[in-house]
Amino acid sequence: MAGNVAIRRGENQDAGTIAAFNRAMAWETEEKELDLATVTRGVGRVFEDPMKGFYLVAEADGEIVGQLMVTFEWSDWRDGWFWWIQSVYVREDHRRTGIFRQLFDSAVEQAKKAGDVVGLRLYVERDNTKAQATYQSLGMYDAGYLVEETMIIPL
């Protein structure tokens, strides 16, 4: 199934699907029900402002079946950018077919072409061992950091 997949940059007309996938991913991984209007607005802002990031989507038979978002973090320690992979989602009927690998490989290739990207990072739920195994199979590893946060506006 993954052989017939095209990877491309997300476009504004993809926003509805991306927002729906984001909601599905939040529910599947954290049992969080995200507000549709908020998520749709957030996705739209990425398309309005390329400094916020970009989406890669996987398309099969004219339908988006997977996605990821890339955001940017400047590292003064390394004098370069880290690209953060976020909002990863592959439609259930296309999982375990290599779609995430194709999305990830495309992100890596684009990072290499950019010339100033020093690495890619992502965060993953501690209990999501399937996702961790997938990321490790792609050469990613536990960087030794925990993510701490404080919310200004609660979900």
Image: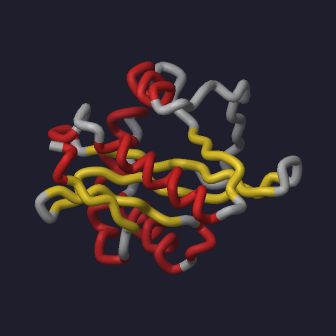
In the picture, measured across the screen, residue 154 lies left or right of residue 73, that is left
Residue drawn at x 23%, y 44% is 91
In the picture, measured across the screen, residue 93 lies left or right of residue 112, that is left
Up/down of 58 relative to 148, above or below: below
Instruction: Work out whether residue 13 or residue 148 is closer to the camera in this orientation and state it.
Output: 13
In the picture, measured across the screen, residue 21 lies left or right of residue 125, that is left
Query: Farthest residue toward the left?
Result: 61
Task: Estimate the x, y position of residue 41 in percent, counting from the top left.
Answer: 44, 70
Residue drawn at x 72%, y 61% is 116
Q: How is the image coloured?
A: secondary structure
Task: Estimate the x, y position of residue 61 in percent, counting from the top left.
Answer: 11, 60
Instruction: Work out whether residue 16 or residue 109 is closer to the camera in this orientation and state it.
Output: 109
Up/down of 54 relative to 74, above or below: below
Query: Farthest residue toward the bottom?
Result: 48
Task: Estimate the x, y position of residue 32 in percent, counting from the top left.
Answer: 41, 40
Q: Quadrant of residue 112?
A: bottom right
Q: Quadrant of residue 13?
A: bottom left
Count every numbered label the image shows and give the total.
0
- Where is the N terminus found, in terms of image quarters? top left
Residue drawn at x 41%, y 46% is 88
Task: Estimate the x, y position of residue 49 in percent, counting from the top left.
Answer: 56, 77
Query: Farthest residue toward the right?
Result: 77
Up/down of 137 relative to 67, above or below: above
